[in-house]
Image (cartoon, helix red, strand yellow):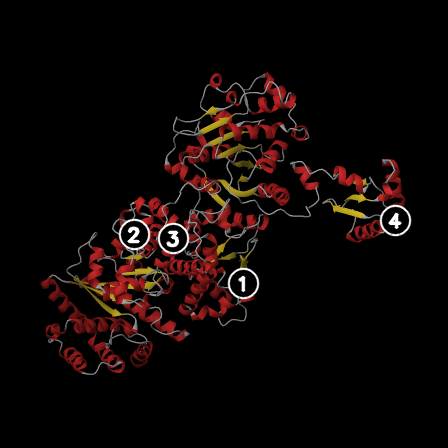
């Protein structure tokens, strides 16, 4: 094997003797030489060989040796006339492995193609590859795509044998017959494709299969003579002739090829030469990864030569296990895939693979083309999506007003935090989510959710805009007899909100155990402030009556508020305070009025030091214990406590499990988010006209199903993120506003739209749709991520230094790396990792063949933390 120093010496020696020296280093360590010189004029091949060897031999080298196995020696005239060069490698595993790396790497061809050729390949058999192809083909056909399947697994045809058709009704010829005949007589006795193709399904489906052939004695003879290398050295190539005739005669949208397993030349041809997209099916085992290591190496080299194929990966069949085991297998696969296959710009590693669990119905079915239930085919839909996104768009837009007019009309609410929104605007932008009906049940007293999921907007809607809240609730529940009181919220809500300094003073004067007494005192005070006439109802508790009466006639300062609550929170008043609330409760019973007590800003309202966090924990535990003990006795007074999810997880108090069934997690579903976007976009008259043919308007939004919402949004941001095998836009957006705890953030979605809209306005009036092009959305993502990171730092100031320490790192990171990064921080590294997980910034991963935990940074935070993803191009 030649070393780099040897190769450099050879080049220097030859360049001193010949005009043109081209050298290609082979993976084996040897080289190929191409010399062009006038010194070869008049010399035959042997003389040229002797001339060059005479120069090389003193240095121990020789043409035709293991070190220089291939060479071309020509004159300038011969080069110009014949363009003699080394032949391109054939699309076989061995030739591509031994071929030199291309000097000019061809970029990935991501143009929209019709037909798109998709090859399903597996390194090992028995993984359900043929079944997968069949089900996906049927799904594409249902989407009005014309699909032709080719069974190129000639030695063990899976697709052919799966058709539930008697053999005597099968086509008289197949792949092997066609290719064999065109090898023997390219221009005569050409088999008719009509004799090779079989229609699948009913007349409404454009689904066809070209089987391997009919099994008989001739089939075995032809198979024995089938050599890919032989066919590929022939011009015209009979395999490509088959593909070309299918394209011309049937004009399919997709050609789906079932390839031979392993390192077989037929499988290589189907994947490496014919495919635009390869679907790699495998079980996540050590043997599979070892084989696919070489598969991806060869495919990457071929892609650098011809710009294709691209790859996607299907883990199948995954064993049916618990969620943790399932996710660990997917995490291991993702780590392996990102280490072996490039992640193109505009996609994330999750776009490259899916996992399909073992399904006994699929395992035993005789005909994968039969009508199957949604529960069976649903897991295969992402594969159909991969293929569909590489085809011409099916949704065409028309009757478009001037793009600039619509862009100017679009106005997404720029007050992106709940406390910045003007009260009169709240009801206009508020989106009634799918869990809203559950929220308005009076039995739900604890509403958990991540920062930015809309807790504070819910609070403001009910407390500041109660009439609008009742209108929004009316389809599910009549709340006309319910009044809403904001016990605790943002400081500018009213003059009766305790500040962080107030909380410190209360605990300082009454001790750490004050909180079970404080919250009923706080609630009683707010009830009487809201209904001042009711103060007469508590005259029986004279000291309480006098304390509150005295407060009501004084100037409403924070000092007076805190002093009053301290008096009411003394142990001597504890039972009387709760009795007073019960008395008021009876008054509400008599008037048939319910009261909802709202609590918000419990995360940041206590301050941001470690001592403040401990005080917050004690205080909230006191609130929860109090309500568990007395809440059921206030049958007309109900609590609505809006609390950050991670804070709830940190609380420890007796009978915490008793809140199960009385709580809910605030989560935004996909359709909730799209309704939020459309509700604001429909304020544009021109955009409303654009989607009117879909019967999309503000009045119909709540009734529209997810597919109609997605189609309407195609007019806003297109169907997919660019040409070729790119993600659907709605899916791309959804992933980038989701954190590691699967929380989706409407605030981040609005920031994305605002930034993309601004980008489009600056780019000029481009007439083509969509209104927001992929480059605008991609350009907006840094601002979205930075905004989200800023919000988290504001909410979790104790994590700011740890987040900054992640700058310039690559995701995912192993635990030991994180421990080193966080080693000099105030908190223990393990504690910081745990908090970053709870905050949704990190996602725990389990790598293959390693006991060390790994952590990925959610796409939402990656750019804002100035990080990069491993494997990203």
Q: Earlier in the sequence, mark 1 or mark 3?
A: 3
Q: Which of marks 1 and 3 is in front?
A: 3
Residues packed near mark 1 inside 10 Å, few (<14), some (14 to 19) or many (20 plus): many
State the separation of the CA atoms marked 3 and 2: 35 Å
At x 35%, y 52%, the residue is 674
Q: Earlier in the sequence, mark 3 or mark 2?
A: 3
State the separation of the CA atoms marked 4 and 3: 73 Å
At x 55%, y 34%, the residue is 125
Q: Which of marks 4 and 3 is in front?
A: 3
Which residue position holds label 2?
Answer: 434
Q: What element carries label 1?
A: helix
Residues packed near mark 3 inside 10 Å, few (<14), some (14 to 19) or many (20 plus): few
Q: Which of marks 4 and 2 is in front?
A: 4
Q: Earlier in the sequence, mark 1 or mark 4?
A: 4
Residues packed near mark 4 inside 10 Å, few (<14), some (14 to 19) or many (20 plus): few
Which residue position holds label 1?
Answer: 818
Q: Is mark 2 on a helix, strand or loop?
A: loop
Relative placement, left or right, of 820 versus 577 is: right
Q: Which of marks 1 and 2 is nearer the N terminus?
A: 2
Q: Residue 724: image x %, image y %?
A: 51, 44
- The answer to whether residue 153 of the structure is visible from this angle is no
**Res 175 → quadrant:** top right
Check residue 368 in the rendering and tell me which mark sits there, or answer none: none
Which residue position holds label 4?
Answer: 59
Q: Residue 450: image x %, image y %?
A: 37, 61
Q: Earlier in the sequence, mark 4 or mark 2?
A: 4
Which residue position holds label 3?
Answer: 402
- The answer to whether residue 47 of the structure is visible from this angle is yes
Q: Residue 192: image x %, image y %?
A: 54, 21
Between residue 782 and residue 835, name the one nearer to us: 782
State the separation of the CA atoms marked 1 and 3: 51 Å
């Amino acid at each position: 094997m030649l070393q780099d120093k040897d190769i450099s010496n050879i080049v220097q020696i030859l360049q001193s003797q010949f005009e043109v020296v081209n050298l290609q280093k082979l993976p084996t360590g040897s080289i190929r030489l191409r010399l062009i010189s006038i010194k070869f004029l008049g010399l035959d091949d042997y003389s040229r060989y002797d001339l060059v060897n005479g120069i090389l031999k003193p240095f121990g080298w020789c043409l035709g040796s293991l070190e220089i196995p291939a060479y071309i020696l020509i004159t300038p005239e011969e080069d110009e006339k014949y363009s003699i060069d080394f032949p391109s490698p054939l699309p076989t595993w061995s030739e591509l492995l031994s071929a030199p790396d291309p000097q000019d790497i061809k970029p990935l061809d991501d143009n929209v193609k019709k037909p798109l050729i998709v090859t399903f390949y597996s390194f090992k058999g028995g993984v359900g590859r043929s079944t997968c192809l069949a089900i996906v083909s049927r799904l594409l056909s249902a989407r009005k795509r014309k699909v032709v399947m080719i069974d190129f697994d000639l030695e063990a045809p899976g697709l052919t044998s799966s058709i539930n058709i008697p053999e005597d009704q099968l086509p008289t010829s197949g792949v092997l017959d066609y290719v064999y005949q065109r090898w023997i007589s390219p221009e005569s006795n050409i088999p008719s494709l009509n004799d090779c193709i079989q229609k699948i399904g009913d007349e409404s489906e454009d689904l066809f299969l070209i089987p391997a052939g009919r099994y008989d004695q001739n089939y075995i003879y032809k198979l024995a003579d089938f050599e890919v290398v032989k066919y590929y050295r022939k011009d015209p190539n009979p395999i490509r002739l088959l593909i070309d005739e299918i394209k011309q005669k049937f004009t399919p949208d997709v050609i789906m090829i079932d390839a031979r397993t392993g390192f077989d030349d037929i499988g290589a041809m189907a994947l490496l030469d014919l495919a635009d997209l390869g679907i790699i099916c495998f079980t996540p085992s050590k043997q599979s990864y070892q084989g696919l290591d070489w598969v991806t190496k060869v495919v990457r080299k071929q892609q650098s030569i011809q710009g294709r194929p691209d790859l996607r990966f299907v883990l199948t069949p995954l064993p049916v296990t618990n969620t943790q085991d399932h996710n660990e297998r997917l995490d291991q696969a993702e780590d392996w895939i990102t280490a072996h296959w490039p992640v193109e710009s505009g996609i994330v590693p999750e776009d490259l693979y899916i996992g399909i669990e073992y399904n006994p119905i699929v395992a035993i079915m005789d005909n994968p083309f039969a009508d199957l239930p949604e529960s069976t085919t649903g897991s295969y839909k992402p594969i159909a999506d991969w293929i569909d996104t590489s085809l011409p768009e099916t949704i065409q837009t028309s009757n478009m007003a001037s793009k600039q007019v619509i862009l100017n009309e679009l106005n997404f609410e720029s007050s992106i935090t709940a406390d910045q929104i003007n009260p009169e605007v709240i009801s206009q932008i508020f989106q009634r989510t799918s869990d809203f009906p559950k929220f308005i049940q009076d039995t739900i007293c604890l509403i958990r959710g991540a920062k930015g999921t809309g807790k504070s907007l819910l609070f403001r809607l009910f407390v500041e805009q109660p009439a609008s809240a009742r209108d929004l609730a009316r389809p599910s529940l009549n709340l006309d007899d319910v009044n809403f009181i904001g016990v605790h919220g943002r400081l500018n809500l009213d003059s009766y909100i305790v500040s962080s300094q107030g909380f410190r003073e209360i605990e300082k004067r009454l001790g750490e155990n004050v909180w079970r007494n404080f919250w009923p005192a706080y609630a009683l005070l707010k009830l009487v402030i809201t209904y001042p006439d009711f103060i007469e109802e508590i005259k029986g508790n004279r000291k309480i009556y006098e304390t509150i009466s005295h407060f009501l006639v004084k100037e409403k300062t924070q000092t007076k508020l805190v002093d009053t609550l301290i008096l009411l929170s003394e142990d001597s008043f504890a039972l009387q305070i709760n009795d007073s609330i019960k008395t008021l409760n009876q008054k509400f019973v008599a008037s048939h009025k319910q009261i909802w007590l709202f609590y918000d800003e419990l995360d940041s309202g206590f301050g941001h030091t470690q001592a403040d966090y401990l005080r917050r924990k004690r205080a909230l535990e006191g609130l929860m214990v109090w309500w568990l003990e007395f809440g059921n006795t206030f049958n007309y007074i109900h609590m609505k406590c809006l609390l950050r999810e991670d804070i709830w997880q940190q609380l420890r108090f007796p009978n915490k499990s008793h809140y199960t069934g009385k709580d809910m997690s605030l989560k935004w579903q996909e359709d909730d988010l799209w309704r939020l976007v459309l509700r604001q976009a429909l304020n544009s008259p021109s955009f409303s006209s654009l989607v009117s043919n879909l019967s999309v308007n503000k009045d119909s939004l709540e009734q529209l199903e997810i597919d109609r919402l997605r189609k309407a949004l195609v007019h806003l941001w297109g169907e997919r993120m660019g040409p070729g095998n790119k993600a659907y836009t709605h899916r791309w957006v959804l992933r980038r506003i989701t954190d590691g705890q699967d929380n989706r953030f409407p605030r981040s979605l609005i920031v994305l739209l605002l930034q993309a809209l601004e980008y489009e306005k600056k780019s000029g009036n481009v007439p083509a749709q969509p209104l927001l092009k992929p480059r605008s959305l991609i350009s907006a993502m840094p601002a979205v991520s930075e905004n989200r990171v800023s919000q988290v730092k504001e909410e979790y100031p104790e994590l700011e230094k740890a987040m900054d320490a992640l700058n310039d790192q690559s995701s995912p990171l192993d635990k030991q790396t994180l421990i080193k990064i966080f080693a000099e921080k105030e908190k223990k590294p393990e504690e910081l990792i745990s908090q970053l997980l709870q905050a949704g910034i990190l996602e725990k991963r389990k790598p293959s063949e390693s006991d060390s935990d790994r952590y990925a940074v959610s796409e939402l935070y990656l750019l804002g933390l100035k990080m990069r993803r491993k494997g990203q191009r």
